[in-house]
Image: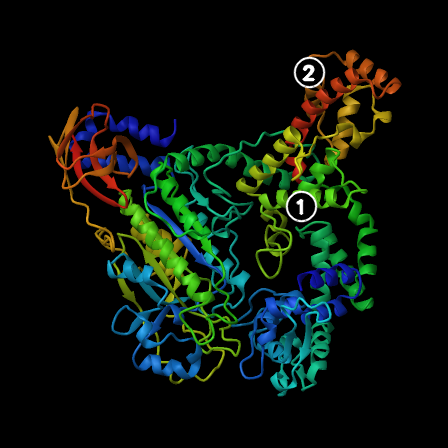
Amino acid sequence: MFFRYLRLLEGSALESFRRLLVAVTIEPQTLVSLDGDSNSADGPNERYARALLDYTVGRGPVAGPGDFSSYTEQDVLAAARSLTGWRVRHQESTDPTQQPEAFFVAAEHDTRTKQFSARLSGATLTNQGEQELLALIDLLLSGPNSAQHLAKALYRYFVDYNIDTADQTARIEELAMLVQQSNYEITPVLRCLLGSAHFFEERYRGVLIKSPWEHTVDIHTQLGFTPRVDELSANYAYYRWLISRAAQQHQELTSPPIATGWPAYSCAPFYHRNWATAGTLQARTRLVNSVLGNGVAYPDGTVVHADFTATLGASVLPTNPQDYVEQWAIQLYPVPLTEAELAAATAILLGDQSPATWSALIANLRLDPTDPTLTLSLEAANARLLAHLLHSPQIHLK
Amino acid sequence: MNRRRFIQGLAGLPLVLDGSPAAWALQQLEALVGGRSNGRVLVLVELRGGLDGLSTVVPTGDAYNELVTLRGSLLPAVGELLPLNDMYGWHPALEGFQRLYDAGALSVLQGVGYPNVVRSHKRGSEIYATAASATETRQSGWLTQASLTASPSSSSPGAVVLDGTPAQATQTPTGFDGVALLDPSTHTPIPIGPGGDAVGRQRFAEELDFLQHTISDSNQFGASVAAAANQGDSSVDYPDEPFAAQLRSVARLISGGLESSVYLTHLDGFDTHAAQHEAGHPSEGKLPQLLEQLGGALLAFQRDLELLQLQERVITLVYTPFGRQVSANASGGTDHGAGAPAFLIGSCVAGGMLGDLPDFSALSDPTAGVPVEVDYRNLYGTILEDWFEVPSSEIRAQLYQEYERLTMLGACDAIVPTIGAATLDAELRCAPNPFTKHTTLSISLARALDIQVSVFDAHGRMVEEVFRGGLSAKQHSFHIDTSRYPAGVYTFRLVAGREAVSTRAVRS
């Protein structure tokens, strides 16, 4: 059931948000997890309806009793009643011909007319049986709030969670217009956002804290660990390793702590900052220490160590030590180092060597990239440098 | 010089020996040098998801019969309820709360909330965390507003969050006060590498600053928190689940000498929209299991505090962001409601029940929650006033203008009696008492026992271990060198298994 659900998200994330909402609403995993499968006419269950409103029109500031500006408690109940009657069969089935599936039980559906509040234009939904779900989602997506809410969510995820300039508000308005014009197709909206000069502006570099998963994958990639394309089982072991490392930093990939997902993407006012506490930053530090020091240990006992040269590529190594440090900084950080930081990092790279010895080392490596003595010196210098650079607070920003 | 050493240094002066003027001077100094800290501790337990209060503290008599039509499927049978008072019974899974209540170590407050309770999880939690009203947004958490998150010393954070996630109650305009840790007993120092060129990059600078701040708090407090967790004691068996483990950590941290004022914990899973009990068995299933975890863990925690002689320093507030609807839905559960009970636990609480529930016979709205009788900010204010000695004028100015004190804290005399264990037949006596440079502790045992004998200061911190091992059934004497003890009251405690006896003596 969960696999089905993941496939649904993976396959539809870049298509129609409207179709995705319809599909998610009656996906067996959702019905079971958010109690839709026991929502019925004689005692509606409000749980999924509330989540659906939060996902579409979004929850605005509280304006009065039960009134969230964009919807009210009346709408929670009306939406819950529109969604009554959906059930799941073959939930625990191990028979491949009987996959878990949702079905509609007309007798459990509330056939009365549902009256929505003025926040949703006082709309009514008459009984439409299993089609009523489509009408409900059309209703929720018809006003400006849903498009705004979606545009904002995309903007916060990709650009900056902090929205306080007129320029930002104008961009979000533009995106929201495009959401409506494209009838909630995600791809054109993302193409517009990610192709805009705004997205690439220097002032939005390094303003979002990475998730534990991003931190974990980035650290491994930067240290030259890659999945082995030819070995399926080794890849499984590698990904399991990554998943367990991210979990140690408080992100269990398929189990966010609240129904609306990870607090980092939905919890005002600090959004992405929710990832970083004393505890999780200590766990991130342990990851860096362990991967730098001990490499990746596979369950079969194999240990793979960091390959520093993989990231930069041996052929282009600059002979100037400061340039070399700068190349690493570009790989690792969203924002360049200050002159003083660059000088300090260069001193760490060199250790007790002179800059000339370094230049000679690189020049010789260009002639013979496999010479064991030369490679060893480079590895040692890299290990010193990376232990310094990977412990930058900036490593957590993207 | 940190505050603790400063005060210890002062305690060595002869001035302190003669009582009240010195005690007054000490209080003034404490007020000057460190936040709110008066050595007392508040433990917060948030029941996330919204507690079904009517399944927790169940009305009996006529009120029970009224509820049968509204939520009959959810009600435990009358005979199964555990005795509470003449109007209510505990849910059968809440033996832990029953024992605390019977000992006078638990106060129940009915109908807690605020006007127009918000039925959204996120907003509901945010309101409780920031002491806001339904319509107001506050930038800072209530603990921050009340200055409880200020560090009492350079080695103790003001607040410790036990689950490693940011706690909104400790929020500041730019981040979070205190430290949130995944495992308080381990500490990993975080080296601080290059930050990057923040000139002209305002947003980057803000995020970098937040990270640097969090890292520096972690580096400043992490090691002493871990040291306290490892030095600290805990001598009862807790239920084997994560919530109880969080409370055990709290006991270890306090007994290990951490001076933090607030510890934040939570228990998840109260969002019981469906199948909150097993069909036909209201005393089994999801909610009963949670209630059992809750009561079991808090009972163990209180027993632990008593054995550690910390019971006069710690109170625990159990609260939930909103209650659930009075009527059941058709899923065998309840949807989000309004008011809910809150519980204050500890030897220093007044005990008993405050507030009452209305008559549900006239209930016409099927989505109605339990009405709110008491504003939750009065509960916060009472804790600030009675526990942390914050003047009520300050509470009204900073936290809640309409604050009115509740009678929930009293004398620190409640002790939870031990049930099901053999009585410890041991006597302790200190002579001379008062003592100066040395004293002799006599221990009489009626039977041979494996024991541990330790000395604690007035703040509940262990001063030294006197003896650990087996002793025969007779009188034993231990000569204790007290020449380095600062003047004050000391507790000599003997622990054998899960039992303890203690005696007090004064160093003059």
Q: Residue at x 20, y 23 (%)?
A: B483
Residue B189 location, x and y as percent?
Answer: 54, 31
Vertical relation: A330 (above or below) B267: above
Residue A374 location, x and y as percent?
Answer: 79, 16
Q: Residue A240, labelled with which disc? A: 1
Q: Which residue lies most toward the right here? A: A367
Quick one: quadrant of the N terminus of chain B? top left
The answer to whether tags 2 and 1 share a subunit is yes
Q: Does the CB distance between marks 2 and 1 fall below 8 Å?
A: no
Q: Horizontal placement of A327 versus A340: left or right?
A: right
Query: Label 1: chain?
Result: A
Quick one: quadrant of the C terminus of chain B? top left
Q: Is mark 2 on a helix, strand or loop?
A: loop
Q: Horizontal placement of B87 versus A373: left or right?
A: left
Q: Mark 2: give few (<14), some (14-19) or many (20+) Cα within 10 Å.
A: some
Q: Mark 1: give few (<14), some (14-19) or many (20+) Cα within 10 Å.
A: some
Query: Label 2: chain?
Result: A
Q: Residue B426, labelled with which disc? A: none
Along the line of sight, which residue is nearer the eye, B76 or B179?
B76
Vertical relation: A45 (above or below) B161: below
Q: Which of marks 2 and 1 is nearer the N terminus?
A: 1
Q: How many labels does the image show?
A: 2
Along the line of sight, which residue is nearer the eye, A54 or A72?
A54
Q: Which of marks 2 and 1 is in front?
A: 1
Q: Residue at x 26, y 52 (%)?
A: B348
Residue B227 location, x and y as percent?
Answer: 42, 33
Query: Circle 2 sits on which residue?
Result: A351
Vertical relation: A230 (above or below) B399: above
Q: What residue type is labelled 1?
A: Arg
| Quadrant in the rendering for residue A190 | bottom right
